[in-house]
Image: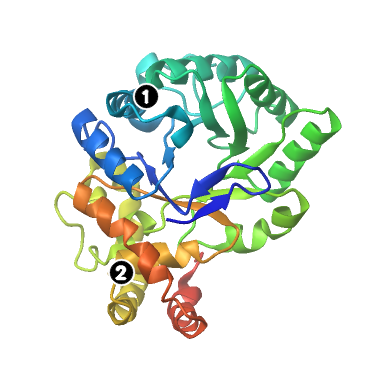
Amino acid sequence: MRYRRLGRAGLRVSELSLGSWVTYHTQVDVNAAAEMIAAAFDAGVNFLDNAEAYAGGRSEEVMGQALKRLGTPRLNYVVSTKFYWGLDRQGDAVNRKDTLNRKYLMQAIEGSLRRFGLEHIDLIYCHRPDPHTPIEETVRAMSDIITQGKALYWGTSEWSAADIRAAWEIAERHHLHKPAMEQPQYHLFHRKRVEHDYARLYEEIGLGLTTWSPLASGLLTGKYRGGIPEGSRGSLENMAFLRNGLTDAAKNAAVAQLEPIAAELGGSLAQLAIAWATRNPHVSTVITGASRIAQLRENLGALAVAERLTPEVMARIEEIAAPLADR
C-alpha cells in the first residue's frame, strides 16, 4: 500500500480506502464489517469513509461497533463522516435535514460521535452544498467543530469549484479552519469536475480529493452488460435511480472494449477502473466498497494493476472511455 497526503494537509491516507455506502447495515452486519475492516487494515488501508445519512445512521453504528471489537489503536486509522441529509428516522423537522446551518451541524457532530463511539472524527464533510444557508455560517460552524476537538479536518462533497473557493477565502479572511478536501464522484465516465473544474484549486489552495464510485456503481465491473442481475446494487429498490445509467448501451459497449485491456494487464475490469482512478496525482485516496471479503481483496488487487498502466495503456483506455465521459 502507498500513502498520499490529503492535499496540502500533513495527514496521509492510503491510496485505496474502504467506504460503507449501500453496504453497511443493509448488506453488511457488524461481524462482516469487522472481518473486512481487519483485512483492509492488514493490507495497509488506513481510511474508512462513512456518512450520517448512510442507512439512517446505522452505518456509523455498524462501523463503530466493528472498530471497538477490533481494538485497533486510534492513531492507526482515519474515519470520516458527512453531514447534510440528516437521519430519515428522526422525522422531517425543518432543521433536521437538507441543511448546513449552524444548529444542524453542531448537533449532527454529536450524533455521529455517539453512533461511532469515538471521541473525535478525523474528517467531516458537508455532504452537499446548501443554497439556503450562507457559506460563511457553514464555514464558521465547521471550523468551530474542529476548534472544539470533535473533528480534525473538514471539507466538502460535490461542491462547485466556486463555492469551495468562496469557503476557503472566508476561512482565510477570518482566520478559521479552512476546507482541506473535497469528495467528488470520479471514474472513467465522470471526470469533468475533478479534471477541469477543480484544476486551479489543487495548486492555489492545496485541495485534496477522496473520490468515490470508481466503478460507476458497478457499471465498470461489466456485470450490467446483460441487464440488472438479481442481488446486484442496481436491483436494490433504494438504488433504482441508478438503473438507467447502469444499462446505458454505449457505456456497456465501451466496458466490453476495456475487458481485453484488463486481461492483458492480468486484472479484472474492476481492478482496471480502480487503478485508473489512482493514476490521477490529485486524488489522495480512492474509496472502494465491498459486501464480501473476496470483493474487498479483488479491489485491493487494483494496486498491482496500477503499476502496469503505462502511458501507452492509458492512451488506449482514454480512446475508449473519454468520448463517453460526462455525457
- Secondary element under disc 1, as helix, strand or loop, is helix
Hey, which residue is sitting farthest right in the picture? 173
Q: Is residue 77 shown to the viewer in this render? A: no
Q: Compare residues 64 and 97 and report the one nearer the observer.
A: 64
**Label 1, residues with CA under 10 Å away: few <14, some 14-19, many ≥20:** many
Judge from the rendering whether residue 291 lies leftward or rightward of residue 92; answer left or right: left
Judge from the rendering whether residue 147 lies leftward or rightward of residue 295; answer left or right: right
Judge from the rendering whether residue 107 lies leftward or rightward of residue 228; answer left or right: right
Give the Cα distance between marks 1 and 2. Answer: 32 Å
**Residue 279 drawn at (x, y percent):** 51, 66
Residue position marked by numbered label 1 in the rendering? 57
Number of numbered labels in the structure image: 2
Task: Tell me which residue sits at (39%, 63%) in the image.
Answer: 303
Image: 215 above or below 43 = below
**Label 2, residues with CA under 10 Å away: few <14, some 14-19, many ≥20:** many
**Residue 229 drawn at (x, y percent):** 16, 57
Quadrant of the frame with the N terminus: bottom left
Q: Is residue 146 shown to the viewer in this render? A: yes
**Residue 249 drawn at (x, y percent):** 31, 71
Task: Tell me which residue sits at (60%, 14%) in the image.
Answer: 103
Q: Amino acid at mark 1?
A: Gly
Residue position marked by numbered label 2 in the rendering? 269
Q: Amino acid at mark 2?
A: Leu
Q: Compare residues 278 and 198 and report the one nearer the observer.
A: 278
